[in-house]
Amino acid sequence: MDAITCENLGRLFKSKKRTVEALANVTISVKKGELFGLLGPNGAGKTTLIKVFTTLLLPTSGTAHVYGYDVTKDEKKIRPIINMVSGGEYSGYGLLTVKENLWMFSQFYGIPGKEADRRITTLLNRLNIAHMEKRKLRTLSTGERQRVNIIRAFMTEPKVVFLDEPTLGLDVETARLIRIFIREWLEHDPDHTVLLTTHYMMEADELCDRIAIIHQGKIVALDTPQALKNMVTKEISLKVDVYPEIGLDWLHSLDGIIGFKSKEMGGKVRVRAVVDGEQVVGDVLAGINERGGKIQYLQKEEPTLEDVFLKLTGRGLE
């Protein structure tokens, strides 16, 4: 039995003015012990899928199971064996201390007093915030609060943890600490399972055993990070900085452009493109020159997960 499964899963949001299809015939299967990633931009359907698995939203169509339990009928069996952390969330009461908040959550789950105290102390030390246990929650920084959220989720000793953009907006040190902790938790028990959503391609590449790329509510690719990157080995990944800023709409109609994105950076524009061969590289550079742009930086790179996304959808992850 797999830890998490769904088949032909759909979710519609309806209003008087329109209907939005957040998920469209999504089928995935996550093995026990796996760190499975959902990679996609904001609005792709990642959070909606997690909310279905965590019994916070009912599916409109299809089926979804966690440890064999049906999310539409067995929520009382699913909730004790799962937990969830979202990026940027504020869980708890600001007037209570860190330890008081964690104690409160432990009692919601019925963890015996001595065991709750042991788990809280162990995790406070592991996440390097034991010295903050008597501080009011409202006084913590974003990164410190997220460490508390991680402790809140993992102290219940769940079988499955859903992490929805867990490092969103965090400093490099805190994000790295959380990633290491997640990997160590998985290695501690072969049945521990994580479903991670992110739009950080490097995080997905570093952490995930397999990745599903989701776009407009649909799974457009699913494989290991390396196998996904192998999809673009025949193409060229190109990064170009152009000064001054010039219009780039002409790239859409250029033969051999598989996908591209651009970002303005204070008077210049950075272009990342996946192109079909060296001839197209020359066409891109010539087009920039013809439109008055000067190339400040040019690099052909090893393919990344974002290049896979560019190839499949023609747009960047942002």
Image (cartoon, rainbow, N blue to C red):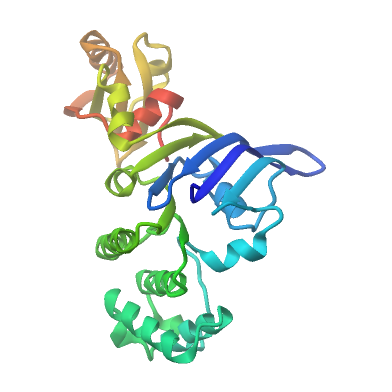
Question: Residue drawn at (57%, 36%), measured in percent from left and top?
Answer: 26
Q: Please count the marks in the image.
A: 0
Q: Is residue 245 above or below residue 144?
A: above
Residue 133, how many percent across, how many down?
36, 87
Give the farthest residue toward the right. Answer: 16
- Rendered-image quadrant of the C terminus: top left
Question: Residue drawn at (62%, 64%), measured in percent from left and top?
Answer: 77
Residue 10: quadrant of the picture: top right
Q: On the picture, is 127 further left or further right than 54? A: left
117 or 253, which is in the foreground? 117
Residue 199: quadrant of the picture: top left
Residue 130, how many percent across, how many down?
30, 84
Viewer can see residue 217:
no
Q: On the picture, is 282 further left or further right than 12? A: left
Q: On the picture, is 157 further left or further right than 76? A: left
174 or 262, which is in the foreground? 174
Residue 286, how many percent across, how many down?
24, 12
Residue 127, how many percent across, how many down?
30, 74
Viewer can see residue 14:
yes
